[in-house]
Image (cartoon, coloured by chain):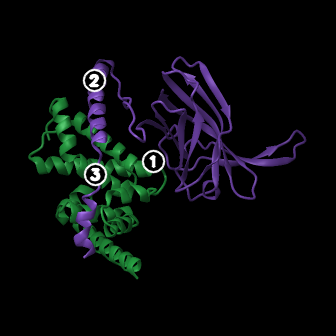
Chain colours: A green, B purple
Amino acid sequence: MKQESVKSPEQIEAAVYLYGDRLFRLCFIMLGSRADAEDAVQETMIRYMQKAPAFENAEHEKAWLITTAKNKCRDMLRFRFRHPQIDLDELQSFAVTPSESSLLETLMQLPDKYRLVLALYYVEEYRVEEIATMIQRSSSAVKMRLQKGRTLLKEAMRKEIG
Amino acid sequence: MELQNLKTAVEKIKMTDDAKQSIVRNCQTETVRERHNAGHNRNRFRKPVKLAAALAVCFCFAGTMASADQAGFFQDIHNLAGAITGTSYEQASEEIEVCVEYTQGSDVLYVSAVFLKPDVAPYRELDTVSISEYEILDASGKLIAKGKGTEPAVVQNGGAVMEIPVAHIKPGDYVLEISSFTGEKKADQPLQINGFWMCEFTV
């Protein structure tokens, strides 16, 4: 990636509106709070602005932002010495139906490594190999996390209903 | 079924427009600040106006050498008559990594202590830790504040986060120097953990 000059205010605004929701979703899934997720998105956009790499295409740019956001969330989790405190009221504010609320709640109770791969695979629709590159793990590790994440999610949902 | 609905449910998690606009403004402010600092060879920057939970500048100190070898040792404390009245832990500088985090507009400086060897004594036994003695110096080395004893913080995952009040400190560059922590375990005498840690921060 080549360095470019610092991005213009218009470019930054365009990037925030284009990628902001996607990054916020992933950060929220990892951190469990709106405020922390907003912090993480801001940190990611500042890094995007300062690093200003030249991307091959929009997909490349999106993947870079997601990886940076993921790393930022990891740093925040490490520094704060805690598991994310999930605010159920915030979670419910996003969901339109009770079943969506229940599903989000269940997702957020999984360990963050499963949440992230489930979100990248099922929501952002990345391939296993792409996820492996983003999270710096092998494709086998990603597949195992997907499988385990699916199992845990289904078990938890079954308990909810049962 | 759940996985098919997962995408629908998760895609409803969105930022507010206010938050997006705030991020855009903060990035633009940062651009101005970076340009201003470009000629001053600064390698750190201050975060702009905070969002709901503020961003922070964070500096760390991990001892005088980046060594994982344990250099600390237990030492008996004697009274004037020579009787042993307690125990302290000495030369812990390289065994605890200290980071400070200050958020613009905040009244406190967050100080995190990470035990580099959390599975050995004394660290593995501690339930809480607090800062026993600290000093805050300004850029010229002048003593601005001094304190003994912060609120004990619960040890979790090999570390703890404590708070030092800084409401009275004017904007500027400072250094926090810590010479001692107190570690506590239930039903046991507090343990003084001595060493030297130093972190810079900017108010």
Could you tell me which residue is drawn at 60 percent across and 22 percent down? B144
Residue extending furthest toward the bottom:
A162
- Kindly identify the residue that appears in the image at 32 percent across and 40 percent down: A43
Label 3 vs 2, first from the N-terminus: 3
Using the image as rendered, state which of residue A157 and residue B97 is in the foreground: A157
* Same chain for the residues under marks 3 and 2 in the image: yes
Residue B14: give its label. Answer: 3
Q: CA distance from mark 1 to mark 3?
A: 25 Å
Q: CA distance from mark 3 to mark 2?
A: 28 Å
SS under mark 2:
helix
Label 1: how many Cα within 10 Å (few below 14, some 14–19, many 20+): some
Q: Which part of the image, by quadrant, shows the C terminus of chain A?
A: bottom left
Within-10-Å neighbours for mark 3: few <14, some 14–19, many 20+: some
Q: Residue at x 30, y 27 (%)?
A: B29
Percent of width and height locating residue A99 = 32, 70
Q: Which residue is mark 1?
A: A79
Task: Determine whether, in the image, residue A104 is placed left or right of residue B64.
Answer: left
Q: Are marks 3 and 2 in contact (CB under 8 Å)?
A: no
Residue located 33% across and 22% down the image: B41
Instruction: Between label 3 and label 2, give the one nearer the viewer.
Output: 3
Alpha carbon separation for disc pair 1 and 2: 28 Å
Residue B13 is tagged as: none
The residue labelled by disc 2 is B32
